[in-house]
Every structure is written in C-alpha cells, then in structure tokens.
C-alpha cells in the first residue's frame, strides 16, 4: 500500500475519490467524538487506534486536523509528494526564471517557450549552473495570472475583452424604445453594372430594434460609413417600406416603421455630423453614444452582422472572414453580383429567414415579437415623410449666383432660385441625396425646400460614388472617394435605397 498523508486543508468533497471518501467517513465516526472532548485520555486514544488500525500518534494528528477543520474531507488521504504549487529550485534560480519570463516571454512579439528556455539555459551556463527543465518553466508561467499573460502578449484590449465582466445590455419594455445602428464591411466583392468589372466590397449599415431584434433599416454603399448613409438608414427605419419593396422587387412584408425614442451608436464621426444630430433633434429622437473603444456595448447588432456575414459566404465573390478560411478562392475573379443585385439578395435574407426564425434570446421570431409589441402602440409616425428624409440628408452651405448653385463642381439651376441671387452673399443650405446627384434640395429662408435639377439637363444621373473627382482633387479616380472619409461630405451610394421624396 502506498504511503499517504493528511492534507493541510480539506479538498472539496466532490473531488475526493470514492475509496478515499469511504475511509474518511470511517475515520470521522471515530475521530469526531474524540475531537469534542476537552481532554484526550490515553485509553480512549488507544481504543481508537485499534479500531482504525493506526498508531496512537496518528490518532492525535487526526484529532488536531479535525479540530482545525471539523469536516469529513480533512480526514481523507492524499498521496505523499510535493504539495501542489510548491517549488523545489533554489530561490536564486527562481528569481532568475521570473526575471527571464518578464523580460523575454511576456512581450508583444509572443516568443515561444523554447526561446525562453534557450535564454535561461544560456544565462545559467554562463554562471556554471544547471539550467531548469521545460517543465519547471512551464509551471512558473502557468502560475502567473492568465490575464497578466494575455495583456502582455496580446494587448490590454484583448485581455479586457476576455476577462472584463459583462453586464446586461439596455433593458427595453417596448419596440422602438432603443434602436442600434452600426456598420460593417461586407465579405463579398461586387461588380459594376456595365462592364461587370470588380469594384470592391460594399459597406452595410443596419438599424436594429433592440426589443424585438427586428431590422428597421438597411443601407448598402460602396463608400465607407458617412453621415449620408446614416441619415438614409434612419429615414428608411422611420418610414413605411412598401415603395422600397416595390422598387427592389421584394415580395415580402416589412412592417417596421415609426420614430425611435433612443438611437444607440458608437463614436464614429458620421454619428457626430450636423445632419444626423440636427435630424434626430428635429424629430424628437435622442442619441446615446456608447463609451469609446467599447464594442461590447453593441452586443445586439454585432451578432446579427456576424450571422449575415456567415450566410453571405455562400455567395459567389465572397471574401470570407480571414485568409485561412478563404484558401485559394479567387474572390475578385468569381464576383458576379452588382450592388443592386446584392442588395436584393440581402433584403430577402433579412426579411425572410432572419425575421421568421426563432431568435435564441427572444424564444420567438423577431416578426412575431414586433407584431405583438406594436399592437396598440403609438409608433410616432412623422408628420411629413418627405420633410423627414430631407432633414437627414447631408448638406453644404453655398452661394446662389446668377448661373445657379454649384456643388461637387456641378452646376444646378432653377427659376425658383431667382429671388435668392440678391441676398448679399448670404449662403443657403444645399442638401443632396448621394444615390442621385441629378438634383439637389435648396433650403429656403422660410424652411421649405425647392428641388433644383442639373443646369445641363442632358447630363446623366449619377451616384456620388460614380461622380468624377474635380480637377486638382486628391484620392483615387472614380468619384466620391476624393472626398474626406467619414464626414458629412463623404456619402455612400445605393441607387433606390429609399423612395426619393421632395418636400
């Protein structure tokens, strides 16, 4: 029989093997009465020793251990050997290893254990000392906090994302109480309508109702996130969808409409634009900015985007999420979908499977949650749908001259601007829809808007992304990319994303 010893501290009862637990229970029946006595008589100790088959000295030890920890587990046997976590190397060697771990292993370059062992062994041989084993190094690294190791090797953000406590998200009681808006670069390559040449990956902007997980608005653009894309997403979320569905040939229902109470967004520049902030204030919508560098506060919409990206990977031209997953798949060569075709497919995916599949957090489908939650609820529809869309459009301040108003190096003219020519250099707001630059909307001093078309009516309608850059501009050739990114001037395009309305 192997030698055993009593543990200094009792192990958890569930972790003790059955045989050891049975022996501990047998001992407990004898030791507990002895431990309750104030004085131990020699005769009682000898009787207990004969009953348990132990020496009187062991009985005294059992009683002392039980008095310190009066639980059965303290009488369980454990095998002899070094206590778990004990160290047998000399203190000087331990200090040398710990210093090497700090200087060599806990670095952003993430050196291997083999490199650490080589460094320690080299230092030990220089001092004519026996180097430690790989097992000894691994034990000392494992003894360090996993959070400390991850922060040193992968960064504080990665460590915080794994070990920071997660609190519950915003609690809602009804639909449209909190709406989240966010963007993602879609994992697919698209082609243009004319030459079918690859034009790059689009951006997706989504508006999600937190209470029902129903998608309220979606916007596809070839340009990075901007104030225009955000404004058009909000307008689509608020307005009824029948005209949008007809324009895109989608024969599905999309009952989402109404003004949100709060819109939860990150701190991107597009969410601090004049058009977005003033549009929300104009229509009684509160903006809630989540803390900087805290993606965990987008815990409702980001899983949805991940789900949609995984489903998009089945389409031709998918780029997948990482090079390993992509393998030798030539995404650009296999791209066949245009922007409008992809928008159609994404709408079918969202309005079909996603809206009508049981959501794990809800226990029912987003569509049923929306229909039940909005029954009898005031959705706060806008008084003027056209005015709401114009309130969220990006704008620039321009002078009205005799030949009209110029925006993006394009001249716009209409007789309705004649009375603005002699305003003494006063500027007016010129709003534009990035999906169609064939006309702009000039805000009059009275607050109304007038639609002003191209001065050259033979000029074809183009999106802001397709618009050629002006002479002397910077950026890549081909259009809106010459404008500053993520600002109120840089606007994505998606023809037909919303029914175009004029106040």
Image (cartoon, grey):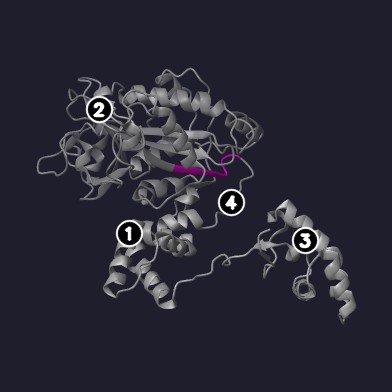
Q: Earlier in the sequence, mark 3 or mark 1?
A: 3
Question: How much space separates mark 3 and mark 1, taking CA atoms?
Answer: 49 Å
Query: Would you say 468 lies left or right of 431 here?
Result: left
Circle 1 crowding by C-alpha within 10 Å: few under 14, some 14–19, many from 20: few
- Residue ID at (76%, 76%): 57
Q: Earlier in the sequence, mark 2 or mark 1?
A: 1
- Count of numbered circles in the view: 4
Tell me the element at label 1: loop
Query: Would you say 255 lies left or right of 111 here?
Result: right
**Residue pointed to by mark 4:** 168
**Residue pointed to by mark 2:** 332
Query: Would you say 48 lies left or right of 238 here?
Result: right
The x and y percentages for residue 15 are 68, 55
**Residue pointed to by mark 1:** 108
Residue 462 versus residue 134 in the image, above or below: above
Does the segment drawn in magenta span residue 179? Answer: yes
- Residue ID at (40%, 60%): 134
Circle 2 crowding by C-alpha within 10 Å: few under 14, some 14–19, many from 20: many
Circle 3 crowding by C-alpha within 10 Å: few under 14, some 14–19, many from 20: many
Residue 155 versus residue 92 in the image, above or below: above
Question: How much space separates mark 4 and mark 1, taking CA atoms?
Answer: 32 Å
Question: How much space separates mark 2 and mark 3, taking CA atoms?
Answer: 70 Å
Please state which of residues 315 and 396 is positioned toward the viewer in this rendering: 315
Tell me the element at label 4: loop
Q: Earlier in the sequence, mark 2 or mark 3?
A: 3
- Residue ID at (24%, 50%): 426
Please state which of residues 449 and 66 is positioned toward the viewer in this rendering: 66
**Residue pointed to by mark 3:** 24
Does residue 398 appear anywhere in the picture? yes
Mark 2 or mark 1, whichever is nearer to me: 1
Is the residue under label 1 in contact with that under label 3 (CB below 8 Å)? Answer: no
- Residue ID at (30%, 46%): 486
């Amino acid at each position: 029989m192997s030698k055993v010893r009593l543990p200094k501290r009792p192990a958890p009862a569930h972790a003790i093997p059955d045989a050891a637990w049975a022996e501990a229970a047998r001992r407990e029946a004898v030791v507990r009465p002895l431990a309750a006595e104030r004085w131990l008589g020699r005769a009682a100790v000898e009787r207990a020793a004969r009953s348990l088959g132990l020496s009187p000295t062991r009985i005294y030890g059992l009683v002392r251990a039980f008095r310190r920890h009066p639980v059965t587990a303290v009488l369980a046997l454990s095998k002899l050997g070094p206590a778990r976590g004990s160290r047998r190397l000399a203190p000087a060697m331990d200090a040398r290893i710990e210093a090497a771990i700090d200087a060599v292993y806990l670095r952003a370059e993430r050196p291997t254990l083999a490199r650490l062992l080589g460094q320690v062994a080299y230092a030990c041989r220089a001092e004519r000392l026996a180097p430690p084993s790989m097992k000894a190094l691994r034990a000392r690294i494992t003894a360090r906090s996993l959070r400390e190791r991850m922060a040193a090797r992968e960064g504080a953000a990665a460590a915080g994302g794994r070990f920071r406590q997660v609190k519950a998200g915003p609690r809602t009681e009804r639909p449209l109480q909190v709406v989240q808006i966010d963007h993602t670069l879609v994992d697919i390559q698209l082609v243009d309508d004319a030459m079918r040449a690859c034009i790059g990956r689009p951006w997706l902007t989504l508006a999600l109702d937190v209470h029902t997980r129903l998608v309220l608005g979606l916007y596809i653009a070839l340009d990075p996130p901007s104030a225009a894309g955000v404004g058009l997403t909000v307008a689509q979320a608020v307005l009824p969808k029948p005209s949008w569905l007809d324009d895109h040939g989608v024969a599905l229902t999309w009952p989402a409409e109404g003004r949100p109470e709060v819109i939860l967004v990150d701190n991107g520049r597009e969410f601090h634009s004049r058009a977005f902030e003033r549009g929300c204030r104009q229509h009684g919508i509160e903006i809630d900015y989540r803390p900087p560098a805290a993606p965990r506060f987008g815990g409702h919409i980001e899983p949805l985007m991940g789900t949609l990206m995984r489903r998009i990977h089945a389409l031709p031209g998918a780029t997948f999420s990482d090079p390993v997953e992509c393998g030798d798949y030539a995404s650009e060569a296999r791209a066949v979908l245009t922007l409008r075709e992809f928008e159609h497919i994404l709408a079918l995916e969202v309005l079909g499977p996603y809206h009508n599949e049981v959501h794990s957090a809800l226990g029912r489908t987003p569509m049923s949650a929306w229909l039940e939650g909005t029954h009898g609820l005031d959705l706060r529809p806008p008084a003027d749908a056209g005015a709401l869309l114009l309130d969220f459009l990006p704008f620039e301040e321009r002078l009205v001259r005799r030949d009209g108003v110029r925006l993006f190096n394009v001249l716009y003219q209409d007789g309705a601007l004649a009375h603005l020519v002699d305003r003494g250099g006063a500027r007016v707001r010129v709003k534009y829809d990035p999906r169609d630059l064939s006309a702009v909307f000039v805000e009059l001093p009275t607050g109304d808007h007038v639609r002003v078309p191209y001065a050259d009516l033979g000029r074809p309608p183009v999106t802001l992304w397709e618009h050629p850059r002006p002479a002397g501009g910077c950026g890549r050739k081909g259009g809106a990319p010459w404008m500053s990114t993520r600002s109120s001037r840089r606007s994505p395009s998606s023809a037909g994303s919303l029914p175009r309305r004029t106040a």
